[in-house]
Amino acid sequence: MPRHPDAIIERNQILSDARMRLPSPTRKSQPVSRGELADAVNAALDRLYPDTAKELRVDARWIGKLERGEHRWPGEERRAALRAALEADSDAALGLFNPRRTDDQSNVNAGRFPFKAKVQVKLKPPAQIDTSVAHPARRYDYWLGGKDNFAADRKSADAIEARFPGMRAGIRANRDVLRRMTEFLTAEAGIRQFLDIGTGLPTVDNTHEVAQRIAPESRVLYVDNDPLVMAHARALLTSSSEGFTDYIEADLRQPEAILAAARDRDRLNLSEPVALMLIAVLHFIPPGKGQAQAIVRQLVNELPAGSYVAATHFTVDFMPPEEKIRYQQLLDAGISDIWPRDEAAFSAPFGGLDLVDPGITLVNQWRRGAGADDIDPSRISVRGAVWRKP
């Protein structure tokens, strides 16, 4: 998708159709899922770019963003790997184009459009973004009781909740624990710097708001890989006069880029303790290849002693058997890109860190206040914890 905050989002049906024509390697008479296509892209990256493939890896969520038109022009290496995985002879055959190049021939000559016509990227005000298609961030906003959502978002959210009745409760509990964790880190642990990866759409009690209410001088750097989120963040998230709030567009799977941006212009002082916030983001990394552990270790290794990590993660451990089956079907079909982990897998990336009381709990149980409601664990399905780097 164009990085301009007011650009229209149009679905890449060409890419979606190309995927649907490719047979699944594991499911008879079924098209390849987004997850399977991501695996094929990663295999192509390993072949084409063995020295940098690890940093370029993709997942089902990345494929979904391309198909929804939220990302139109990946880097050269990923485009080459995607072409190889789908056996396409040009970027245009996959509906990919560079939205920054709007002249007559530049994209045509590069093989990015299958026609010779003047290409223009139309920019419209945010109110004219296509609201007839549900967006994950706006759907999340609806579940939280926010106002930045539309009829399609609400319809989609209600349909999901009909299959998984705990969805709304789990998301709200996850948001509540972000506030409590930030309060603990600021008021009790004395942290004044936050690196928040996977920001999502702004809503109530964002990290910088909670931290700067307690310590106005707090510095917060938000990171997200969705240009739409960044556009909202820049418009709505404003810092206290004493503190600092900034935003960068980057991907969790590129920790080097995140750390470099944190150092750039002294956004964060990495010689002083930092709270690394990984709230509901690690579950977008597929399990089984050690990628989540490698990412976390690379980030934590650059933080000084006395830093903290706060994390939450989706789990199916408390779901009834029939709900587990339904959720696995969503994963198999490439509809969901949220990968559950059990407690051992969730905690594995944080080995060597000191677990803060009360340890790993369901998010509604983590340092909850007196009088908090007891909710069926199957309706929460999100674990959380805070660790300290000794």
Image (cartoon, rainbow, N blue to C red):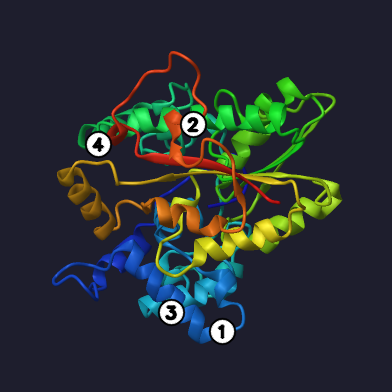
State the SS at label 4: loop
Mark toward the start of the polypeptide (4 vs 3): 3
State the SS at label 3: helix
- Give residue 198's mark: none
| Badge 2: residue crowd in 10 Å (few <14, some 14–19, many ≥20) | many
Image location of residue 210, percent across then percent down: 66, 25
State the SS at label 1: loop
Residue at image mark 3: 43
141 lies above or below 4: above
Residue 117 visible, this angle: no
Q: Quadrant of residue 196?
A: top right
Mark toward the start of the polypeptide (2 vs 3): 3
Q: CA distance from mark 4 to mark 3?
A: 34 Å
Q: CA distance from mark 2 to mark 1?
A: 42 Å
Q: CA distance from mark 1 to mark 4?
A: 41 Å
Q: In the image, 309: left or right of 170?
A: right
Taking the view exactly as shown, the residue that stands out farthest to the top is 371
State the SS at label 2: loop
At label 3, the amino acid type is Ala
Q: In the image, 13: left or right of 205?
A: left
Between circles 2 and 1, the one closer to the viewer is 2
Mark toward the start of the polypeptide (1 vs 4): 1
Image location of residue 242, percent across then percent down: 85, 26
Query: CB atoms at circles 1 and 3 under 8 Å apart?
Result: no
Mark toward the start of the polypeptide (1 vs 3): 3
At label 1, the amino acid type is Pro
Q: Quadrant of residue 300?
A: bottom right
Residue at image mark 4: 164
Between circles 4 and 3, the one closer to the viewer is 4
Residue at image mark 2: 366
Residue 283 visible, this angle: yes
